[in-house]
Amino acid sequence: RPVLVPILGDQLTRTIASLRGRTKDDTVILMMEVWDEATYVRHHKQKIALIFSAMRHFAAELRDAGWTVDYVKLTDPDNAGSFTGEVARAIERHDPRAIHVVEAGEWRVQQAIEEWPDKFACEVEILPDDRFICSLADFRDWAEDRDSLRMEFFYREMRRKTGLLMDGDKPEGGEWNYDSENRKPPKEGLEAPERPLFKPDEITRECIDLVEEKFGDHFGSLESFGWPVTRDQAEEAADAFFAERIACFGPYQDAMVHGQDDLFHSMLSTSLNLGLLDPLDLCQRAETAYKDGKAPLNSVEGFIRQLIGWREYVRGFYWLHMPHLQKANALNAQRALPEFFWTGETDMRCLADCIRSTRDNAHAHHIQRLMVLGNFCLIAGISPREVQDWYLVVYADAYEWVELPNVAAMVLYADGGRLASKPYAASGNYINKMSNYCSDCAYSVSKKTGDGACPFNALYWHFMDRHRDTLESNHRIGRIYSNWDRMGEEKQAAYLETAQDFLETLEPAAKGWARAD
Ligand code: FAD
Ligand code: DLZ
Ligand code: SF4
């Protein structure tokens, strides 16, 4: 009797723990396209096509390498529609002596897997996902007894653990973090080399057709689909990043340019999250680029911090705070998500451009997600549940373990400040400094109140004013209130009225965009 090894859609790694040490003649690998996963939120069309195509390519590679793969397609007439239902059917087909599965990335799926030992007659072994650098147990130990968790201290531990950019027990160059060198506004005409786009092959085209047929009314466009769907393609995308873009990654990390969607970002998150690339390997390659004099320390340190710092940290944070993180709403934000988040129809040029990129590419880069889209949701007081659903739907790299901490905790401060030391609230001034959006916007960024004033300006003060009780004591933001107080009542009233008038124009999104009714 074989061992059944279910491999989930984001576990496409040849060295995954459940396959390591197994022999090909007594293992059946099970891969399942299931309706529940494709619809628990109504994912962007590119996200579903990407996952199905990457799964099908991975199954083909495993078969070529001599493994037995039982692949259940979405259109299989007997498809049970869920992981648990499909594992039950596979047990009937293969009569396994045991099931070996790697823990799920998402809490929702892990809950289901944890029921398998009671549900199924054979032995079920659930293995830790050791594709991350910090195990969940180690993260818990680190987080224990700390009231507030700060990424920076966690990151230093990860530097010591991996030895990346270490000079003995000191950080390379003398500093742990070179972010102060990484805030360059875009200069006129800033252009980045284009990233490789991978033309859909026959397998991908089949997946695209399937998505059009079954999920044609989901958000997003499939036209520009060019994501890497295999490990080889993902490596090619990484090669291009290390050869052409990493040197400028740091300085322009926070820059935004209208119509230039990728700039110097790596665009590797979809491949990393599917398991096609290894985060430690990418960090080592970045370190080599620095040592070979091909990229400056601030760029390489910045890139490594995103991976061994933020990426690992938000995963640990997620598992520490689930399931209550899903419901957190420390600022009691209740407003509905505006319809323009789905249509892109707004005169705010910054938001329109970020939403366009999101719709066309299933991607927006970090500062667009944080300081344009996220900042707007924060200061406009949009309900965390609605914002979380939106981010989970629209990005091809979105899995709840990484999306939720970023949205609920980093962007919306819904966790009350466990993750971020202050809310990332900003007025139009910040967006103007870091982008070229404002010069051609219907609103005036320099106008603070009244008709035609940039909505971010008044919303910023509306936010600060309505949360004064919570934020005034925060040492990183509290002193801003002296500016507010100095303005005097008339100016304050003008800000609050402008914000209120704007908020009343927001049309709530129709139901059904994110989740089926
Ligand atoms: P780069 O800028 O090249 O960064 C390199 C890598 O670092 C990324 O590929 C990613 O793996 C990692 N990284 C960078 N920032 C973060 C972060 N804050 N958290 C975790 N990993 C990080 N990333 C996702 O992978 N999935 C998500 O669903 C997701 N949702 C986000 C929601 C919000 C509100 C915000 C502010 C950020 C979110 N991020 C998410 C993080 C980040 O925006 C994306 O990882 C990044 O834009 C992916 O593009 P890239 O590969 O070019 O990243
Ligand atoms: C996101 C997704 C989608 C759309 N479809 C599938 C699928 O049909 N089969 C599958 O194995 N995985 C899919 N995924 C990714 C899973 O949701 C992901 O593996 C879980 O989030 C893991 O917790
Ligand atoms: Fe965005 Fe305001 Fe600038 Fe317009 S003026 S692009 S709304 S920040």
Image (tube, helix red, strand yellow):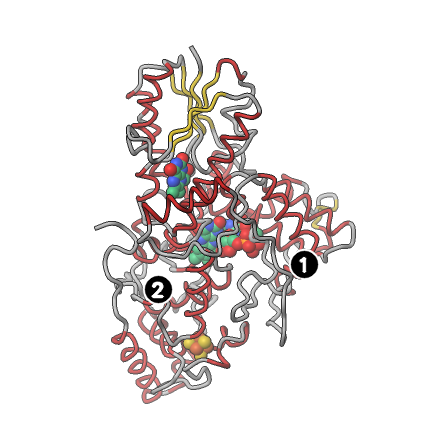
Q: Indicate the amino acid at tag 2.
A: Phe
**With 83 as the anchor, is 353 left or right in this view?**
right
In this image, 126 relative to 193: left or right? Answer: left
Query: Where ligand 3 lies, by image quadrant?
Result: bottom left
Residue 49 in the image: x percent, y percent? 43, 45
Q: Secondary structure at mark 2?
A: helix
Distance from disc 2 to disc 1, alpha carbons, whole Å, reads: 34 Å
Question: Which quadrant of the figure has residue 330?
Answer: bottom left
Q: What residue did someone put label 2 on?
A: 341
Q: Residue pushed farthest left? A: 517
Residues tagged 2 and 1 counted as in contact (Cβ below 8 A): no
Residue extending furthest toward the right: 292
Residue nearer the viewer, 181 or 470: 181
Picture disc at residue 436: none
Q: Is residue 151 visible?
A: no
Of the residues tagged 2 and 1, which is closer to the observer?
A: 2
Q: Nearer the viewer, residue 354 or 402?
A: 354
Which residue is at 45% across, 80% downward? 441
- What residue appears at the point 69 percent right and 45 percent down from the top-left corner? 285
Residue nearer the viewer, 235 or 319: 235
Residue 404: x and y in percent read: 39, 50
Marker disc for residue 298: 1
Label 1 C-beta lies within 8 Å of the nearest ligand 1 atom: no
Q: Pick the quarter of the image with the N terminus.
A: top left
Earlier residue among tags 2 and 1: 1
The three-letter code of the residue at mark 1 reads Asn
Please determine whether, in this image, residue 504 is positioned above or below residue 42.
below
The single residue placed furthest to the front in the displayed view is 202
